[in-house]
Structures are given as structure tokens and as C-alpha cells.
């Protein structure tokens, strides 16, 4: 994608005059909805590295299981709404987000272990910028992210109380093993579907100006930008957990829904296409799709699990052709 306006950075990457780099491969959706497809393609997507299970789905599930088994109050205590066990859940969630999101931030931005290799935007987070609380983008993002952790924890506390009092539809591994596993695997698709529609909602002008603008101050995103939202947006965002009020679930499903919703934004907003360890080892993230949303605002409202943007005409794949199409539409509009 080099032209006369590009420069070569210290990693041999072509950057345009705005300092932006993009990978050669365009944005791709998960192949589950491709047609025609083959079992071989689906198996490679499901079991491959990287793929559906590895690394991110498996990592979020492992974190959920550990939190469920070792860092969740006993359900017998949850029959009564009490501050003690609610604060234990809040503290556990603060630690999870702090360790996961903070770890990505330290590696990529504080320590800059891979420099600008695979970084979409060549600049670093804003400092001494009055648009952000404390005049600092990272400090602003951490503050709003922790507000989001409180909202997430309130949803979780309410649902735990419902499970403890047998007030919610319940399904265990022993009762229905097929559904138990299927619901875990379906979770990313449910979250993608839910996120697309609430995201379109908050791009409605009145809600954008009063709520979503706060998140979009982050054009050059970092891990802490993912959960940096207005509290109203946090409520809408974590309302994906309300599905457990009507769909038979185990508390592990509910927790997995919350963990992926809380930790996933750190990955999708990291600002890098891959994590690099040493000279050769790299973990692909391929989150160009959402970076382009922050770059252009009116494209890529969803994620890669379900091709809703493609179906509803808001898809930008990161290619020069898509750039030209976007610019032409903006001029025409």
C-alpha cells in the first residue's frame, strides 16, 4: 500500500502522511457464515492457531473458570443482598481488569516492548490534552474503565442473587451437557449481535452527542480505551448479560459473558495488529476492524463474529478501495 506519500518506519512498515500503518490483508469475518464453505475450512478456523478457540476464546474461558472456582463467594451467602459479598465480586473484577488490561498497556505502551511494530497509529497516547480528564488520555481511560467495572459488577451481583434464589432459568452440565457446551460456544456470536445494535443506537445523534462522544475522544486507541465509556453506555454495553434472565444458563455462562465483555475491549482497542514476543513469536489479534471504526466513526459497528456490517452496508475492510469508497460516500453525503 505504499505510494509517494508514505514513509518507512524503524520496523520497515509503510506509514502514510498521518503516521498510519495497515496490514496487507484486509479485514476478514469468521468463516461460519461464508457460503459455500467446506468442513476443512471450518475446522481450520475452529481449531487453528490463531482461531476461534485459541488464543482469546480459550483465555477468557480459563480466566472465567479460575474466577468462578476460586474467587467467587459461596452461593449460599448470595441469597440475601449484602454489601460484603457484593464488594468481593467488585474487588475480583477490578483485579481481573487491572491485571489483563493493565498488562497489555504495560507491554505495549509503558515498556514499549515491540516499539511501533504492527501499531496501526504511529503516535502514542495523548498527554497534556484538555479533552481528557486529568489532561491525560491513559488516566482518563483508566478512570472510566473502572466506572465500567462497577456497572459490570452490579449486573453480576443481581444475577448471582437471582441464581441463589432459584429465580432465573437454570441449566447445568449434568442436566444438559449439549446445551451447556453449545451456549458457551454461542456466547461470542450473541455478544457480537448485541454489540452491533446497541452500538448503532448510541451513534444516533442525540445519544452520540450526550453519551458516546466520550468513547470516541479516543481516536488513537490503547487497551484502556476499550472500556472508557459514559456510564449510560456501560449500562447498555453490559446489558448483554440480561439474556440470562430468559435463556437457561449456568452461572458459569453468566460469568463468561461478563468476563469476555469486560476484557475483550482491551484486545480490540490495543492499537496493535499483533503481540510480539522476542524475534519471531507473535500472537495475532487482527483488530483492524474496530480501529477503523475509531478512525472513520461511521463504519464497522460490529465485530468479526457475525457479518452484520457487511449485511447492512457499513463494512470497511481496510483496503485502499474501501478508503476510496468511504471518501466518495462522504463527499456525496
Image (tube, helix red, strand yellow):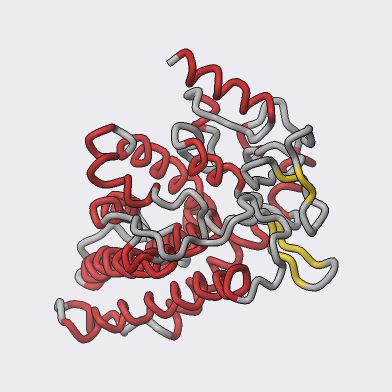
Q: Which of 152 and 58 is in front in this view?
A: 152
Residue at 55% x, 75% y is: 103
Kindly tell me whether residue 259 is visible in this rendering: no
Relative horizontal placement of residue 270, taking residue 163 as reference (left or right): right
Which of the 4 quarters of the picture holds residue 81? bottom left
Q: In this view, does 333 lie above or below 220?
A: above
Which of the 4 quarters of the picture holds residue 135? bottom left
Q: Which of 174 and 81 is in front in this view?
A: 81
In the rendered image, the quadrant that contains the N terminus is top right
Residue at 50% x, 23% y is: 313
In the rendered image, the quadrant that contains the C terminus is top left
Residue at 31% x, 39% y is: 202
Q: Is residue 295 above or below residue 224?
A: above
Q: Is residue 73 above or below residue 218?
A: below
Relative horizontal placement of residue 138, taking residue 81 as reference (left or right): right
User: Where does the image place residue 310, in percent across and percent down from the top left?
Assistant: 55, 27
Q: Which of 247 and 45 is in front in this view?
A: 45
Amino acid at each position: 500500500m505504499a505510494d509517494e506519500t508514505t514513509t518507512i518506519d524503524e520496523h520497515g512498515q509503510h506509514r502514510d502522511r498521518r503516521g498510519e500503518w495497515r496490514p496487507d490483508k484486509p479485514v476478514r469475518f469468521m468463516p461460519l457464515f461464508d457460503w459455500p464453505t467446506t468442513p476443512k475450512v471450518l475446522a481450520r478456523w475452529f481449531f487453528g492457531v490463531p482461531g476461534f478457540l485459541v488464543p482469546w476464546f480459550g483465555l477468557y474461558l480459563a480466566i472465567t473458570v479460575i474466577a468462578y472456582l476460586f474467587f467467587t463467594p459461596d452461593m449460599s451467602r448470595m441469597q440475601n443482598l449484602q454489601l460484603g459479598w457484593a464488594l468481593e465480586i467488585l474487588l475480583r473484577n477490578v483485579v481481573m481488569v487491572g491485571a489483563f488490561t493493565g498488562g497489555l498497556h504495560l507491554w505495549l505502551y509503558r515498556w514499549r516492548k515491540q516499539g511501533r511494530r504492527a501499531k496501526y497509529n504511529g503516535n502514542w497516547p495523548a498527554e497534556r490534552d484538555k479533552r481528557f480528564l486529568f489532561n491525560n488520555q491513559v488516566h482518563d481511560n483508566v478512570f472510566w474503565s473502572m466506572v465500567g467495572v462497577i456497572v459490570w459488577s452490579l449486573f453480576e451481583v443481581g444475577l448471582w442473587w437471582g441464581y441463589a434464589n432459584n429465580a432465573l432459568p437454570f441449566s447445568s452440565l449434568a442436566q444438559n451437557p449439549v446445551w451447556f457446551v453449545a451456549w458457551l460456544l454461542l456466547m461470542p456470536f450473541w455478544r457480537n449481535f448485541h454489540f452491533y445494535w446497541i452500538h448503532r443506537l448510541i451513534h444516533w445523534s442525540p445519544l452520540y452527542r450526550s453519551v458516546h462522544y466520550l468513547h470516541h475522544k479516543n481516536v488513537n486507541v490503547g487497551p484502556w480505551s476499550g472500556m472508557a465509556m459514559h456510564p449510560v453506555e456501560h449500562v447498555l454495553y453490559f446489558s448483554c448479560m440480561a439474556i440470562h434472565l430468559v435463556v437457561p444458563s449456568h452461572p458459569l455462562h453468566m460469568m463468561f459473558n461478563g468476563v469476555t465483555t469486560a476484557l475483550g475491549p482491551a484486545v480490540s482497542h490495543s492499537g496493535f495488529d499483533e503481540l510480539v514476543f522476542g524475534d519471531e513469536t507473535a500472537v495475532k489479534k487482527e483488530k483492524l476492524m474496530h480501529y477503523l471504526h475509531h478512525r472513520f466513526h461511521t463504519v464497522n459497528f460490529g465485530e468479526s463474529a457475525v457479518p452484520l456490517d457487511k449485511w447492512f452496508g457499513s463494512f470497511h475492510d481496510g483496503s485502499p478501495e474501501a478508503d476510496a469508497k468511504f471518501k466518495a460516500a462522504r463527499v456525496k453525503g
